[in-house]
Image: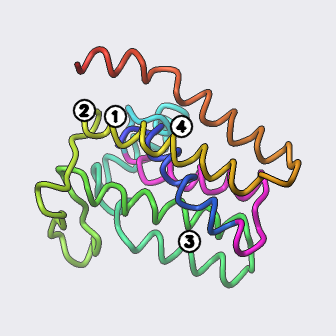
């Protein structure tokens, strides 16, 4: 998935969870968004890879793309650290990280869940797969944006909670910039 689809999908999945556990705030949403970007730090041309090219290039040379950063090992480390430190921020990052892995599981490339121990690619059946940046991914993004707006309406219907709504809208607005152009390019 492209970074915008990862971030928006992860936020749409986690909003009801964060609301249910009473931890819905701008910092938690931001942590999930960061976690949704982190696995692609192993690719220098990814959104996060372009922000920290020295780290990205180094990780890519050592592990390659969709190597160890796309495995449950890094998620387990993040989750363990968040549990040990009782950090809600690390917990949000771990949740976003896992959601990125789950979303990539549906891509044509699949992921290596158990890297470095087992290097087998795990994939869903072909009918459920999408091509990164392809038509199916853009359809997924449009559907998820609609779901996100429905969730925001449902969660905040009787509340005025401007900071979190502003954060979510800013994230979506900044990410959505290239969607129109990308859709016309594909069609």
- Which sits in the foreground, 114 or 148? 148
Q: How many marks?
A: 4
Secondary structure mostly taken by the magenta-highlighted segment of the chain: helix
Q: Quadrant of the N terminus?
A: top left
Residues at marks 1 and 3, CA–CA distance in whole angstroms: 30 Å
Label 4's element? loop
Residue numbers of the magenta segment: 19-42
Q: Where residue 3 sits in the image (x, y, percent)?
A: 45, 39
Residue receiving disc 4: 52
- Does label 1 or label 3 sit earlier along the sequence? 3
Q: Do residues under tags 1 and 3 come within 8 Å of each other at their CB atoms? A: no
Residue receiving disc 1: 138
Q: Do residues under tags 2 and 1 come within 8 Å of each other at their CB atoms? A: yes
Q: Where residue 134 sits in the image (x, y, percent)?
A: 24, 33
Q: Where residue 92 sits in the image (x, y, percent)?
A: 64, 64
The residue shown at (58%, 81%) is: 80
Label 1's element? helix
Outermost residue toward the left in this view: 126
- Which sits in the foreground, 24 or 100? 24
Residue 178 belongs to the span the image colors magenta: no
Residues at marks 2 and 1, CA–CA distance in whole angstroms: 5 Å
Q: Where residue 121 sits in the image (x, y, percent)?
A: 16, 65
Above or below, comparing residue 13 to residue 176 in the picture: below
Q: Between tags 4 and 1, which lies in front?
A: 1
Q: Do residues under tags 3 and 4 come within 8 Å of each other at their CB atoms? A: no
Q: Residues within 10 Å of mark 1 (few under 14, many from 20)?
A: many
Q: Quadrant of the C terminus?
A: top left
Residue receiving disc 3: 78
């Amino acid at each position: 998935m492209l970074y915008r689809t990862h971030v928006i999908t992860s936020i749409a999945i986690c909003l009801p969870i964060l609301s249910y556990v009473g931890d819905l705030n701008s910092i938690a949403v931001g942590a999930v968004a960061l976690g949704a970007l982190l696995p692609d730090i192993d690719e220098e041309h990814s959104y996060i890879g372009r922000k920290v090219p020295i780290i990205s290039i180094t990780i890519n040379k050592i592990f390659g793309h969709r190597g160890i950063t796309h495995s449950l090992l890094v998620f387990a480390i993040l989750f363990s650290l968040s549990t040990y430190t009782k950090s809600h921020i690390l917990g949000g990052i771990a949740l976003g990280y896992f959601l990125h892995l789950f979303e990539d599981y549906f891509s044509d490339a699949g992921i290596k869940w158990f890297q470095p121990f087992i290097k087998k690619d795990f994939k869903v059946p072909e009918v459920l797969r999408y091509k990164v940046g392809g038509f199916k991914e853009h359809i997924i993004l449009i559907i998820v944006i609609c779901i996100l707006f429905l969730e925001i309406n449902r969660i905040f219907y009787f509340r005025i909670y401007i900071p979190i709504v502003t954060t979510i809208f800013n994230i979506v607005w900044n990410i959505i910039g290239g969607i129109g152009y990308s859709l016309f390019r594909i069609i």
